[in-house]
Image (cartoon, rainbow, N blue to C red):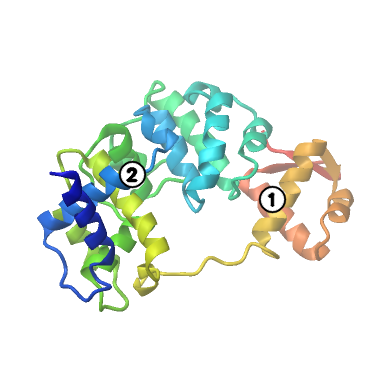
Amino acid sequence: MKNSDQVTLAHVGLHYSVHGSSSPGIVEFQEMVLSHYDLYGRNLVWRNTTDPYHILVSEIMLQQTQVERVSKKFPEFICAFPDFSSLATATLANVLTVWQGLGYNRRAIALQKCAIRVMNEYNGILPADVDILATFPGIGRATASSIAAFAFNMPVVFIETNIRRVFIHFFFAATENVSDADIISLVEKALYRENPRIWYWALMDLGSALKKAVPNPNRRSLHYTRQSPFEGSDRKIRGAVLKILLQNQFLKEEEILGCVAEDPHRVLRILGALESDGFIERRDNGFVLGK
């Protein structure tokens, strides 16, 4: 395919539904998606490896976190914990210290639990099996499938936010409340089985471009929910508590309440939740980070 043809396909692809055209055929859709990737594909650090450990780390980091933030944190995390063994044997304090800035700290614990399970049950080798991966902490079916595609180039079928955006834009231009069940058969039909890894990268990059070019198609998804604000949320308070414990190692309950300028009853509830989740442990009349 000539470069000029690639430009045309990429341009038409981004404006297909906007101009009222009918949905593209599957072959045409594949050509457009891959052509857009040839021209505008992102050079992300985790795309330069097929190391299953690196892919696992990147996929868990990318859950609910922008690519730009992960791009900055991923190299630091891999440098600190280069393999399953080093992550499995690290202290929780060290893991959370390196994780700082990504938010959703539950993912850090889940990631370490994954590493421990890989070391204990699979001799340090991540299983190339979606059904097994889906049982790992913090990994649902979609994340398990993305790991299988990117680490092992398996022809799996899954949906995530950018993929959903692409299919709604091109195949459901005039439809409201589009369900994933409506989309999944098209995802399977369109799958470029010669190279699933490249195909899903291409879909995700096109979805990212669409987000900037058109009103978000995902608002027409039956599963669309707006993310709750971070300011004033329990999530922000949880992060604040963990940050001060990382800095002080041990704090009495009243000291934590003094450091976190929120309703004491709310902070106590959050402390209880952090303890239940394994982030912190109660010691005497205070708290330390969990092991």
Q: Measured from the top left, where is residue 119 in percent x and y?
A: 45, 24
Q: Label 2 near label 1: C-beta < 8 Å?
A: no
Residue 137, can we see it?
no
Nearer the observer, 151 or 2: 2
Q: Measured from the top left, where is residue 154 in percent x and y?
A: 23, 38
Residue 119, above or below 46: above
Name which of mark 1 and mark 2 comes first in the sequence: 2
Nearer the observer, 141 or 35: 35
User: For the residue labelled by badge 1, is the local secondary structure a helix, a strand or a loop?
Assistant: helix
Give the side of residue 261 with respect to residue 113, left or right: right
Measuring 85% from the left and 52% from the top, which residue is drawn there? 259
Measuring 53% from the left and 34% from the top, which residue is drawn there? 112
| Dot label at residue 41 | 2
Give the side of residue 31 with respect to residue 141, left or right: left
Crowd class of label 2 (few under 14; some 14 to 19; many from 20; radius 10 Å): some
Measuring 42% from the left and 62% from the top, which residue is drawn there? 212
- Type of the residue with mark 1: Gly
Kindly identify which residue carries mark 1. 239
| Dot label at residue 255 | none
Q: Measured from the top left, where is residue 190 in percent x and y?
A: 16, 54
* Gap in angstroms between the C-alphas marked 1 and 2: 34 Å
Nearer the observer, 235 or 161: 161
Front: mark 1 or 2:
2
Q: In which quarter of the image is the N terminus?
A: top left
- Type of the residue with mark 2: Gly
Q: Quadrant of the C terminus?
A: top right
Measuring 21% from the left and 76% from the top, which residue is drawn there? 20
Give the side of residue 273 with respect to residue 109, left or right: right
Give the side of residue 4 with respect to residue 134, left or right: left
Residue 56, can we see it?
yes
